[in-house]
Amino acid sequence: MTNVIDTGDTAWVLMSAALVLLMTVPGLALFYGGMTRTKNTLNMMMMSFSALAVVAVLWVLFGYSMSFGNSIGGAGLLGNPLEFLGLRGLMSQSAVSGTVPSLAFVVFQAAFAVIAPALISGAVADRMKFSAWLVFMVAWVVLVYFPVAHWVFAFSSSDGSVVGGWIANQLKAIDFAGGTAIHINAGAAGLALALVLGRRQGFGKVPMRPNNLVSVMTGSALLFFGWFGFNAGSALGANWIASTAFVNTLGAAAAAVIGWLIVERVRDGHATTLGAASGLVAGLVGITPAAHSVSPIGALAIGVLAGAICALAVPLKFRFGYDDSLDVVGVHLVGGLVGTLLIGLLAAPSSPAGVAGLFYGGGLGQLGRQAVGSFAVLVYSFVVALVIALAIKATMGLRVSDDIERAGLDIAIHAEQAYDLTAATSGTTLPHGSNLPSAGIISKEHKA
């Protein structure tokens, strides 16, 4: 940590922040919006847009301070929310984080905070009240994401003046860009929320196909593009670490597409575009925690395993009966676990992390640390999300009415349609045969 601003590093971090923001809007919005049914497309996209709006405000007010402030009591559990309240003290030219202005680091980490709850929304598509979603999101980022970001991303200063999170500093588990803090965290919360919400009408019986695979492919391509900012940007400089993360991200994503499509071809007889897009995301999730700690060959191994394992994990929702609408659990929770745990096996001592995994003679120690960090975040996020969801269900209610679910959330909640087909049809029938809901249905949801 030189505390001298480097303009090249600053330019790269600011560009990386923009790339990560691109991942949520429009990337994730298009990806999730295309995967859901026509009548709920806009509602799904609004969940991503609302994450950008709500979380960015919370981040400026106190979220950054809770995540990166000096640990309260030195326990490594939570940053002091008052230390940087309203980002005070960080506008000074002398406020430097490493080689970049402190505000450059603030906005880069803000982009991570935005996408974490947006990922959760895929688990609850087609049936959650928008008002309940907003309340859940606020509670979850405050009670779960901000503390977990402190655990994983807040490093203690070399002189001991700043104490960071316990996973990064005491446990010393490796999570370069958010396998635990983002993907396992969001996946566990998505599972808890889906369990409390219950299954969609017709789940497992009625086909619920993506409404627009072009949108899905476009969204996945934007996620892929933005992910280079996500991973390589986490080097916080234009340097050797960023270059390693960039190459490993490319290799893992490509290998994961192959891994997923092989499973699809053998199991189902087809290699689909939805599978290719999902495999790409699974590989990106898998390499996120490991991007600076494995070799390029290790990255290929993580990618192909993440793609294949996630492809096998996604159908488990039908076997176990939980309705994870857009496969947040199967891709983000499972992919995050795969990538984080494989660090314990594949970490290469020649990498920027300088840690040896089991396959490089490092023993089981790092694998144990990775497991403790992963499951601590998983359990904490699942339990707290479950409590939040149950509290909302008992007060304002989580789920829309049966009438609204049948008619579609776009018209009932947002009074809009993703695709205006009235010019081509003489009636007022929505795609898939869903009739436009009456004003009474709309008013009931607004009152709810």
Image (cartoon, rainbow, N blue to C red):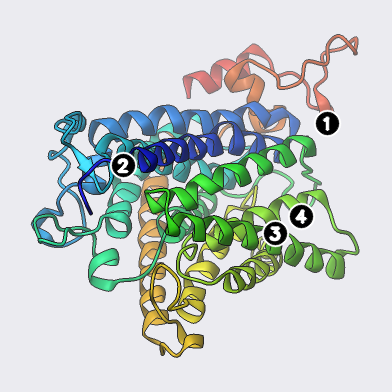
Position of 275 compared to 61: left or right? Answer: right
Would residue 129 be seen by someone viewing this image from the given angle? no
Q: Looking at the image, which residue is at 48% across and 53% down?
A: 231
- Separation (CA) of disc 3 from disc 1: 35 Å
The nearer-to-camera label among 1 and 4 is: 4
Q: What residue did someone put label 2 on?
A: 6
Q: Position of residue 11 (x, y in %)?
A: 41, 36
Q: Position of residue 66 (x, y in %)?
A: 22, 45
Q: Position of residue 446 (x, y in %)?
A: 51, 19
In what element is the residue under mark 2? Answer: loop
Towards the viewer: 381 or 200: 381
In what element is the residue under mark 3? Answer: helix
Mark positioned earlier in the residue sequence (1 or 4): 4
Q: What residue did someone put label 1 on?
A: 432
- Separation (CA) of disc 3 from disc 2: 33 Å
Q: Three-letter amino acid code at disc 1?
A: His
Q: What residue did someone put label 3 on?
A: 254
Q: What residue did someone put label 4 on?
A: 275
